[in-house]
Amino acid sequence: MNWDDARIFLALTRQPSLRAAARSLGIDQATVGRRLNALEAELGAKLFLRARDGYLLTAAGEAALGAARRMETAALELRSKIEGQDENPTGLVRVTSSDSIAAEYLLPAIARLQQRWPQIRVDLEVSAELLNLGRRQADIALRNVRPDTPDLVVRRVAAWPVGLFASASYLARCGAPAPEDELRGHQLVAYGPYLAQAPAPTAADVPARHARIALAVNSSLLLRKAVAAGIGMGEMPVQMGEREGLVRVWPGRHRARAHEVWLVMHPDLQRTARVRATAQCLAEALAEPPG
C-alpha cells in the first residue's frame, strides 16, 4: 500500500461513501472506486463490505487501518517539518472560526494582512466543528473552548464580558425585565449548544426559568441578528452587542464566565512564515475592539 492508496483507504473509513470520500479528497468518485478496487486486488483481500449505509471495514480492513494511520502520521510529520523551515511569507493558510468572529474581526484583519503580505492566501472556513489540526484540516483555529490536546500550541487571545441584550423595539413592546421575576413574560433567543449543557436557562447569570425560548440557534452571528430583529433577548459579548446597536439589559450584570477565544496551531507550523504572520495578525485583531 502506497501513500496515495492509503489516503483513499482512510478517507473511506471517515466518510463511508464513495461520493463523500471523493469530495474530502478533492477528486472524482470514479477515481476513488477504481483505486480502491486496485488496492484490494493488490492486497488480495476485501477491505470493505459494501453495505446499504456505506462502506464498512472487514477484518482485513481493520488490520490495514493501523498501518494506514501510521503512514498518515509520518506523511503529516514530514510535511509539517518541511513547512516549518519555510521563511517566505507566501502561500496558503487555512483558518477556521465561528461566523461572528470571522465577520467582525477576521475579515478586517485579513484585509490588513493582504496589504502587508499580498502573497499569502487565506482560506477561511466558518464552522462550529472542532477541525483536526493534527490531520491538517486547518492551520489556525479560533475556538471558544480551550482544546485539551497536549501537542498543540494554544493561546488565549480574548476574554470578553457577556451581557444580556435586546432591541429597542422589543423593549418598547415587552418592557424591561426585573431580575427577581426570572424573565417572566419575556422571550429569549438562545444558543442551542449551551441549552443542551445547562440544566436551566440563565441570562447574565440570572435564572430565566419563566422565560419562553422563542428561538434557538447554533450560530452566534444569527443570535445577534435575531435579537436585533426583536425576536427576544439574548446573551452575547458586550462589545458585539453594542456594535450591533442593541440595548444592554441590566448593565451592571454580566455572566461570570467570559467569552474566551483561543488561537490554536500545530507546533511545527508556528515556525512557518506565512502561518506565523497570519496568526499574529489575527491575534492582534482579537485583542482590540473591532473598529
Image: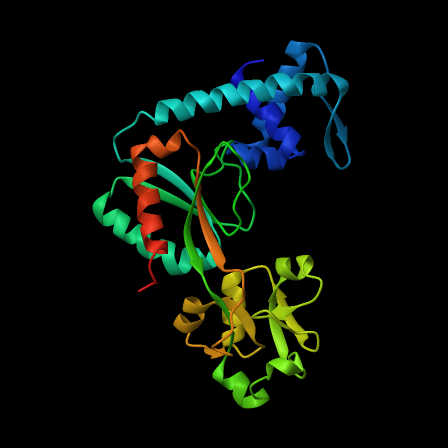
* Residue 94 x, y percent position in the rendering: 41, 41
Q: Is residue 101 visible?
A: yes
Q: Position of residue 172 (x, y in %)?
A: 53, 89
Q: Name above or below for residue 71 compared with residue 211.
A: above
Locate residue 35, reporting x and y percent. Answer: 59, 21
Is 233 left, or right, of 51 in this rendering?
left
Q: Quadrant of the N terminus?
A: top right
75 and 147: which one is in front? 147
Give the tally of numbered discs. Answer: 0
Q: Quadrant of residue 48?
A: top right
| Residue shown at 32% from the left, 57% from the top | 108
**Vertical placement of 26 versus 219: above or below?**
above
Residue 288 vs residue 82, the one in the foreground = 288
Quick check: 104 left or right of 35?
A: left
Asked whether residue 4 is in view, the answer is no
Q: Which x, y percent locates residue 202?
A: 63, 69
Q: Looking at the image, is 152 positioned above or below residue 188?
A: above
| Residue name at image x 53 percent, y 42 percent | 147
Q: Nearer the viewer, residue 93 or 175?
A: 175
Say which quadrant the C terminus sits in.
Answer: bottom left
Front-lying residue, 2 or 270: 270
Q: Quadrant of residue 55?
A: top right
